[in-house]
Amino acid sequence: MSTDQTKVRLVDIARKAGVSRAAVGHVLNHSGADNVRVSQDTRERILKIAREMNYRPNRAAQQLRGRPTKMLGVILNTVNTSVFSARLSAIEIEAHRRGYRMVIGQVHGSADEIRGYLDDFLDRGIDGVLCLFDVMNETRSELAPVFENRQGIVWHASPVLSSQPYVRVDTASAIRQIMDHLIAQGRRRIGLELWSESDQLMSVRQEAWKEAHRAHGLEIDEKLIWIGAERSQLPTRSIVENCIQQLVLQNGADAIVASNDEWAASVVQGLRRHGKRVPEDVAVTGYDNLPLCEIIEPSMTSIDQSHAEYATAALDLIEYSLRNPNAETPEIRVIQPKLVIRESTE
C-alpha cells in the first residue's frame, strides 16, 4: 500500500496496470458508459492496483464535472428504530453491490433538522436521498416546503409531495394475511392494537381489519380496536395493561393483532399476568419479524416486510430518479409482505 501523501491519480493507476486512463476511469468512476469496454481480468487488475495504491476518488472534482459521485444520503428518525435499522442494513448491502456509498443522518421529527441534512447532502454532491421514516399526518404541511424543488428524493411509504417517487410495503395485504390466518384458526373476536391514529399506516391497518371482517361475514365491533395516546409507541406496562383491559377483559378478544413485535411481546407478558395463556386463550401476532420472534416463548407469528426486496426497489427508484429528473408521473414500488406463522397463533 502506498504511504505517500501525494494524491493518486487515474493516470498513475493506468500506467502501473498497462491500460488507458479511460479504462481506469470507467472501472473506478463509472465514466465512459458504453463507450469503454473492459474485460473482467482487466477490471480486477485495476481494482487490485487501486487498492494497493490507496486510491480515493475526488468527489468534489466529479461533482464539478457533473458526474455522479456514487454517494447516497439516508435520513432516519428515532421512531421504530429496530425495524428501520434492519431495513437500512438491507439497503446498504444493495447500495454496496451497485457501487454506492451512504451518508446517514438521524433526525428527531424536526423540519429544520431535515432541511439541514438535505442542504448538507447537496453541498457534498450526493446523488440521491432516501427518506427512511414514516411521515405523520400532522407534519405534512410543515415538511412540504422543505422538499419543494428537491431532486433525487425517494420516500418510504408515503411522499410529502405527490410528485416524488416512493416505495412501500403493502400494509393492507399484511393485515389481510393475519386476519385470514386467525379466522382459519377459529378466532372470531380479533382485537386490533394501534399505537396512534396520526400515523397513516395505522389507519390503513384499521381499514384492512374492517375489510377482513366484512369479507368473512363477521360483525365489526369498534370496541375491539384499541388506539394509544398520540406518539406513545413504547409499550410500557401501564399502557399495555390499558390495552388488555379494553380488548380482552372487557370485550372478550380471543386474538390481538399488535402493531409491532415489541408490542406483541409486551402483550404476551401482560396476558400472563392475568392468567391468560397464549395461544390457548388469546392468540397474539406481531409485525416486522424481528429476531426476538424466535427467542420468546411462545415464538411469535409475525409479518416479514421483505427488506431485501424493499432495498432493491428503493435503489431502483433512486437510479430512475437520477435518469429522469423531470419525470411528471412519480414512480411507485409496492413490496409484498409475508406472514410467518409460529406458536403464538397455533
Image (spheres, rainbow, N blue to C red):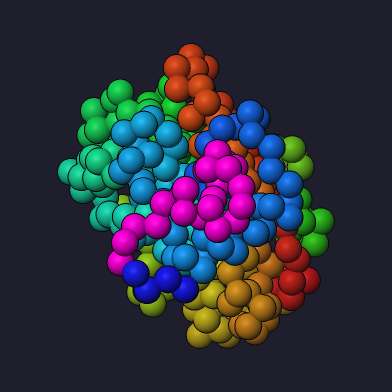
Is residue 25 one of those drawn in magenta?
Answer: yes
Quarter in which the C terminus is drawn: bottom right
**Residue 207, picture quadrant:** top right
Q: Is residue 253 above or below residue 230?
A: below
Horizontal and vertical percent position of residue 90? 58, 58
In the displayed structure, does residue 83 sit left or right of residue 108? right
In the displayed structure, does residue 162 sit left or right of residue 232? right
**Residue found 61% across the figure and 82% down from its top:** 296
Front-lying residue, 339 or 184: 339
Q: Is residue 168 above or below residue 93?
A: above
Instruction: Name the residue at the left extreme.
Output: 112
Q: Is residue 231 above or below residue 334?
A: below
Specify the principal SS of the magenta part.
helix
**Residue found 37% across the figure and 73% down from its top:** 3
Is residue 16 one of those drawn in magenta?
Answer: yes
Horizontal and vertical percent position of residue 170? 62, 42
In the displayed structure, does residue 281 sit left or right of residue 120? right
Range of residues picked out in magenta: 5-26
Horizontal and vertical percent position of residue 12? 46, 54
